[in-house]
Every structure is written in structure tokens, then in C-alpha cells.
Image: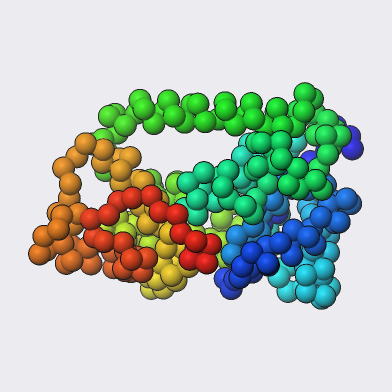
Amino acid sequence: MDNNQKLTYLQLHYSDALFSGAADYRSCLSALAPLALKYPVLAYALFEHEVHLLVAGDAASAKNLMNSLLQALTGEADHPLLDQCEYRSLPAQQLLPQLLHVHQLAVTFGLVANADVYPWCSHAHYAHSQAISPWLASESVWRALNVGQHGRTRAYSAFLDKSQAPSQALAETIGAAHCTQRCNANTVIDQVLETYGVTLTQLQQTRMRRRRTELAGITAAICAYMGMYDVALPTLETTFGLPREDIDALARSASRNHSQYIVQTGNALGDYIMTGLPRSPYLNNSSDASLALEQRDPFNLTGLIGLAADERTDISPPLTER
């Protein structure tokens, strides 16, 4: 490997479930292990509908890896799921930030409160020196990438500590400054794009059409959950280039497939921006609460996951409910 070595972020997303239980996750990791000898895998995170891999190499190498993985799992070469994969080339300097991104996805999606306890990602391999995935890219690969000259575990842990400290300080200092701001559609759009690691410019690309419609639905559903759907619609239509009827349908679909993330993100944005403000009527146990909640939540996200109208708590659903 030379100084021009690149990374590739590979993501497979499919509307139907890719994994139905622990046995499926283990089978995938078992199939990935021998392939990693040829295609250095730096990190992984598996979810019911998604596979995320960080690979040392270019996009062509990552595509060969996924083709081989799908063939090992299904017995079929050039499996149709290959068309559902996205590949993003990155410079080697992005290794540590992208490792953290992959490992925090389970937290972002609301599956766990801490990456330490999510079993289907490679976080523990780095954070606790646990060789749970001995086939992950070796120290020599890290050295070739000019990262972690003092050991990949130390490099990752140091970066993890550095990344968490500013976030905690930020949370403690800016709440009061923003307590009177109103959350708007752009706030939600920015949060969703940050979560999924894409930009508006990237979303306009033809190959990103499927992802653009998916994120439009998620964003719209969050806006609906926060009670500003009608106000946000013009911005959503302009940003995602979709008419209202399409956004309505996409929001309903998102409310079924991404309910946990939508509710948790809606709550987090509301708590962050409205800290210290009086509780809204829809959070009170009054006779009008159900009507207010219906107006706030037209896609029935709260009812879908069984939250009471006045609950605003962190949720950690089982994998099958994501």
C-alpha cells in the first residue's frame, strides 16, 4: 500500500430485512472473515436493513468484496442487492472519524444507549482491545495509512476521547443560548443529513435518487412528529424536489420503517431547542392531549411504538423493531 491509499465507505440498504436474528448476523460475519484477508476491512456495523463497511481500498475493490460476500451468503454471483450498494471514496485521513461514525450508528438509530453494548459492530475490537474480530485490518494496514503508528487501539481510544469531550462541553454551554429558537425544517434536514453522512449536493446526484426519497420521508416524518409538518412542507418540497403527495407517502412509509429514529430525533431536537420553555399542551395529561397529539403526529409515530403522549424518554428497542 502506498501513500495514495484510499478508504471506501460501503453501505447496503434494503427495504426488506437483511437479517432476522443473531444467527443471520453471525453468518454474515463468518462469511466476511475470509474475504477480509484479501480486502482489508477496517470497520463494520450490521443492522436489520443495512450493512456498513469501511474498507482499505478503492470503490472497485469494495464492490468486489460485497459481490463476494453476497455470493458466499446466497450462492448467487452478481446478486441484485449489489445495485442497492453505495460507495463513497475517502482520503486516509478520514479513517478515525469514519470509524467513529460507523460505530456510533447503533446509538444514532436509537438501538442502544452506548456503542459498547451493540454486538454487531467492531467498536469493542478497538475500544477495549478485544479481538472479537481478529480478521479486521491489521496494524500493518494502519501503518500504511499513516494512522495509529502507536497502535490502532491507542489511536482509536485517543480520538474517541477527543471527540466526546467537545460534544459534552457544547451540550453544557449552548443550551441556554438556543432555548428560545424555533426548530424549523432546515434544522431537521441538517440533522438527518448529518446522521446519514450525506450532503444536499450529493443527494442531487442521479445515483442518490433512492436515498434522497428515503431521507425526504424520514425528514418529513420528524417534522410531522414535532408538529410543524404543514409549515415545513414548502421547504421539504424545494429541498428534495418532490411534490406534496410524494412526501406524504414517503413520510408514512418512514413512520413504519424508521419510527425509533424519528421519535428519538424529534425528541432530541425538541429538548435541545426548547430547553426551559413551558411544556406544550400536547405533553399534558389533559382531555385535549389526544387531539393535540394527533395534530402534532399525523402519521401516528407515537402510537406505532407505544409511547404515551407525555413521554419524552430515550428508547432502546430490540433489533427487530428498528
Residue 296, located in which quarter of the rendered image?
bottom left
- Residue drawn where x is 57% and y is 26% of the image: 162
In the image shown, does 302 or 225 lie closer to the viewer?
302
Please say whether residue 70 is visible from this viewpoint: yes
Please say whether residue 250 is visible from this viewpoint: no
Query: In the displayed image of the protein, which residue is found farthest to the left?
Result: 287
Residue 303, located in which quarter of the rendered image?
bottom left
- Residue 45 in picture, x, y percent from top left: 65, 53
- Residue 13 in picture, x, y percent from top left: 62, 63
On screen, 319 above or below 104? below
- Residue drawn where x is 38% and y is 62% of the image: 221
Relative horizontal placement of residue 193, taking residue 225 as reference (left or right): right
- Residue drawn where x is 83% and y is 34% of the image: 139
In the image shown, does 13 or 49 lie closer to the viewer?
49
Where the N terminus falls, by quadrant?
A: top right
Relative horizontal placement of residue 126, taking residue 64 as reference (left or right): left
- Residue 183 in picture, x, y percent from top left: 30, 45
Relative horizontal placement of residue 210, taking residue 142 as reference (left or right): left
Q: By what rule are the colours in the image chosen?
A: rainbow
Relative horizontal placement of residue 101, taking residue 170 as reference (left or right): right
- Residue 14 in picture, x, y percent from top left: 61, 68
On screen, 310 above or below 183? below
- Residue drawn where x is 17% and y is 50% of the image: 280
